[in-house]
Amino acid sequence: MILYTTMPQELIFQTTSAEYAKQQLVYYDGIPLLVRETEAKEYEIIRNLSTNPQHFLQAKYSPGMRVLPTTITS
Amino acid sequence: MNYKGYTTSDSEEKEEKKEENATTAIQQLGQTNIPQMTQDSNIHCLTIVGQIEGHIQLPPQNKTTKYEHVIPQIVAIEQNPNIEGLLVLLNTVGGDVEAGLAISEMLASLSKPTVSVVLGGGHSIGVPIAVSCDYSFIVETATMTIHPIRLTGLVIGVPQTFEYLDKMQERVVRFVTKHSNISEEKFKELMFSKGNLTRDIGTNVVGLDAVKYGLIDEVGGVSQAMKKLRELIELNKKEEGKMLQ
């Protein structure tokens, strides 16, 4: 079937349940982070969910940085 | 001599590592250096961005604010004695009514001073969140859409459904009128006015107008908000001092 449309794919097709499992909330140094597991079994930070503005000034908690799953506290 | 040799190699290694860190920073963030600060902040900042997620989890490509993340953070802010104030930054399209009201009620009942800033947009259920704080700001270019409660794509079939929605709407109206200077008549007038939104009823209120209607306290950005928050913190401290005496 060929579907001709300008609508984005995610508006037409339902997201698979596997997509939901890709993102998760972890605590690293007590900071809540939204992460995504990469192919190398590392966690890539998507969003820093902390309310402390100082946590946003440290490069290691910024989006795009990698965190090892072994260092995750919970 | 040996010792000296060891330190040089060590510092070289450090240098190499530093450089490596800088390259990853460029790759990941497009910038080289972020100022390092270690001191703890007495003002915390809560960002309400994207959609406010309710009982149904949205697909991961959506940017959402989840109440199960936000509510424990508000509890932690209430409990932590080092935190003296909270700044709430809003740029939301709205979302779930119950989740939005839950966040609003949590912010309204917080004992510490709270100041909100609407940046970009604070639409639909973002309105009660913006007014729930002790003092609210809106930047000149930000907008807030006020519209009735609705269920997208569903037809109201029975009178009970309509009454349920009406009651739900009444909760929002009551909360907003209680926590801001806008009158119920004015708020409902904006909510049901025609000809402002495309194929919908409601009003899109921009910066200055939001202040004019009494919905938001003042037009201003981050510096005004921080100044106000510090003022409120001082006031709060004085009151606490009085209570102790």
Image: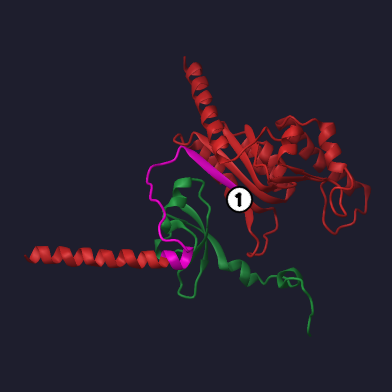
Chain colours: A green, B red
User: Against B21, is B74 above or below?
Assistant: above
Identity of the residue furthest to the bottom in this view: A1
Identity of the residue furthest to the left in this view: B1
Please state the chain letter of the residue tagged with numbered disc 1 in the rendered image: B
Q: Which of B52 and B163 is in front in this view?
A: B52
Viewer can see residue B169 = yes
Viewer can see residue A73 = no
Q: Position of residue B129 (x, y in %)?
A: 67, 41
Specify whether B187 is left or right of A33: right
Q: Look at 86% across and 52% down and name the residue there.
A: B200
Q: Quadrant of residue B190?
A: top right
The residue beneath circle 1 is B68
Q: Look at 56% across and 45% down and name the residue there.
A: B46
Q: Nearer the viewer, residue B101 or B143?
A: B143
Q: Look at 63% across and 58% down and name the residue there.
A: B63
Region in magenta: B25-47
Q: Classify mark 1: residues with Cα within 10 Å, few (<14), some (14-19) or many (20+).
A: few
Q: Look at 51% across and 41% down and name the residue there.
A: B44
| Quadrant in which the N terminus of chain B appears | bottom left
Mark 1 element type: helix
User: Against A6, is B175 above or below?
Assistant: above
Specify whether B52 is left or right of A68: right
